[in-house]
Each structure stands twice: as structure tokens, then as C-alpha cells.
Amino acid sequence: MKPHQLALLPMLLVAIFQPTVQAQENILNLYSARHYQTDEALYANFTRQTGIRINRIEAKEDELLERIRNEGAQSPADVFITVDATRLAKVDELGLFATVKSKVLEQRIPAHLRSPDWFAFSTRARVILYNKAMIKPEDVKSYEDLAHPKIKGQVCSRSGSHPYNLSLLASIVSHHGEQKAEEWARGVVANFARAPKGGDTDQIKAVAAGECGVAISNSYYFARMMRSTKPEDRKVVEALGVVWPNQQTQGTHINISGGGMLKTAPHKDAAVKFLEYLVSDDAQRYFADGNNEWPVVAGVKTDNPALATLGSFKADTLSVPVLAKNVVTAQKIADRANWK
């Protein structure tokens, strides 16, 4: 190769590799344990705004975590998102999340709904639903009331080991201590109308059918039925009343959808942009209007008739990281109380 050709070599190399670098910067690899069709619009809007294409892998939390661990330092995953604080805390305990410093995330997400490594992007409330022909609302105005003998044989529930119930139980541990929480769990079990089975929607339908008088459910399951045009769903909604528990004390327990950037993320800039996008007004509206969750950002205007009908409520402001730390204790309590 002649001297003048050698001089051109560095520029040729830049020309060859620059498109590859740019292409890498316009990709985000997302591992998601959220399984909502409405999220498609959320991701498409991010690509429209930024030009960053999302490669998404969806699976259950345990499957995704096993995949990330097996991939090790070569994992292509940039961001992991899921539902429930307990699951996010598990990822954090495994040391998979990277610390993210972002003024946007700090300013828009309330302090109790984030940690240095993972962030909440929407909330869902754990509400009490009751059969209006069987239960008086004043008898189930708090979670504590679910353990009262006056509603013996009236409670339907999903498994006590499910993260939604473990998070609620962990919040009771946080507020009242382990002993009181166990007394509560035993009281709830003593009030079961039947052995725990199914998911939240199954509990809602069982209460409407009179199989039991009361159940706990995440709010978005009921809001989804409120927006349904199916006659059978309308009949269920008409039979039920909704209680925001503990409005005179700590407030209604809430859980989250959230996520964080992985330590081995190959596209860190894109990952931070995506996390920041999830707290934009546009994205927050998608969470609310598309999947019946509440925005974490205050003041975001939504257009969801079900959420508007449910109205405002006092939410428990217990720190989500603190809540997550009590999940192991909650599981032990559920086991001892035979809340299977």
C-alpha cells in the first residue's frame, strides 16, 4: 500500500464503522414482564419521538431473570420492566440494576416511588370490592376489617403467595409490625368463603355471583370491567361496590409498574432516554388511558371514564423500597397463617 493510501486508511475505517455505531445507538433492547396490548402504542410513540427502535422480549419475570443471568456480561438487555415492587426488589437484590442519575426521573417521580436503581412509572391500588346485596360498606372500610369475625365465611382471595397479596401483607408489616400482621393474616384466612384460587378477576366474579361477599383486587381489573361493553361484565359491575381502604389512617395500599437499566446494558444512553420517556406526559397518559393505571407524575391530565368514576382517594405513601424489604417476612407470615 502506497504512503498516500496509508494516510487515508483511518478515514476509511471511520466511514466503514460509523453506520454500525449509529445503528447501535438507535436500538433499545427491552426485557418486559408487562403483558398489556395497550403498551404497543407506548413503545411506538417512543420510537416516533426519538428514532430509537425497540427490540422487545416478553416473558414471565423468573424466565427473564434466568435469561439475564445466563447471558451474563454479554446480555443484550438494556432495560427490564415489570409489575410489583417485590419483583423489582428481587432484581435489585441480584445486583442486576445500574444506578441511574437523572434529574428528570428525580423531579417527576415522588421520592417514595423510586430507588436509586429502579423507578415506578404507574400505580395501581389494592381495593376492596363487596357484593352490595350481602355486605354493608361500613363493615369493610379498612384492610383490618377483612379479619373481623363479623364477615366470617365471606372473603374470597387469590393465593397469599402471589406478589400482589405479599405486597399488601408487607405493607401491614411495615405499618403494624410482624406480630399484628400475622394476627391479621390468620383472621383473613379464618374468614375465607373457600380456598384461595384464581386471579383478581376471578375474585371479582365470585363476589358478584354471591359465592362470597367481599374480596381484594387491584383496581385496574375492576376498571377494565367498568369499561367493557360485554353484558356479563356490566352485570358484574352493577352488583359490586368499591371501597378505598384505610382512608382514615395510612391510606389505600398501592403497588407499581416500574423498571430500571441493567448494569450490562450495551445502549446506556438509549436506556436512560427510555426511562425518562416513561415519565413524560404522553407516556403517563398511555398508562392511565390504556391500562387503567394511575400516573406517578402529578398533574397529568387523563381521559379514562372508569378512573374518573372511581374518583380520587388517599394513597399510602409508604416508601416502595421499604415495602419491598418486608416481602420475605410477609411470605413467612402467609405460610404460617396457611394462606396458600
Image (cartoon, rainbow, N blue to C red):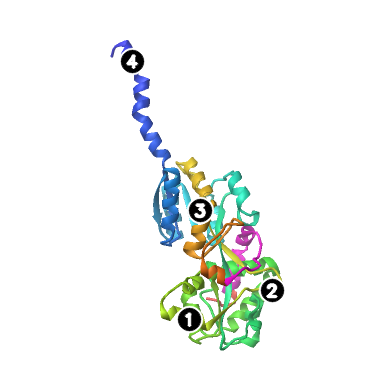
Mark in front: 4 vs 2: 4
Side of 305 relative to 36 (left or right): right
Q: Splitting the image into 4 quarters, where does residue 34 fall?
A: bottom left
Label 4 vs label 2: CA separation?
78 Å
Q: Is residue 318 highlighted in magenta? A: yes
Considering the numbered disc 4 on the image, is that residue within a helix, a strand or a loop?
helix
* Residue 97, horizontal then vertical, whole percent: 53, 49
Res 180 label: 2
Instruction: Provide the secondary structure element on which disc 3 rests.
Output: helix
Contact (CB < 8 A) between labels 1 and 3?
no
User: Mark 3 highlights which residue?
Assistant: 282
- Could you tell me the amino acid type at mark 2? Lys
Which span is picked out in magenta? Answer: 310-335
Amino acid type at circle 3 is Asp
Q: Position of residue 326 (x, y in %)?
A: 62, 63
Q: Which of marks 1 and 3 is nearer the N terminus?
A: 1
The answer to which of marks 4 and 2 sits earlier in the sequence is 4
Please indicate, yes or no, whether residue 145 appears anywhere in the rendered image: yes
Distance from Cα at disc 3 to Cα at disc 4 = 51 Å
- Give the residue number, with chain letter if any, for mark 4: 6
* Of pointers 3 and 4, the one earlier in the residue sequence: 4
Task: Mark 1 vs mark 3: give the one in front.
Answer: 3
Look at label 1 and name its amino acid: Val
Residue at the spot of label 1:
236
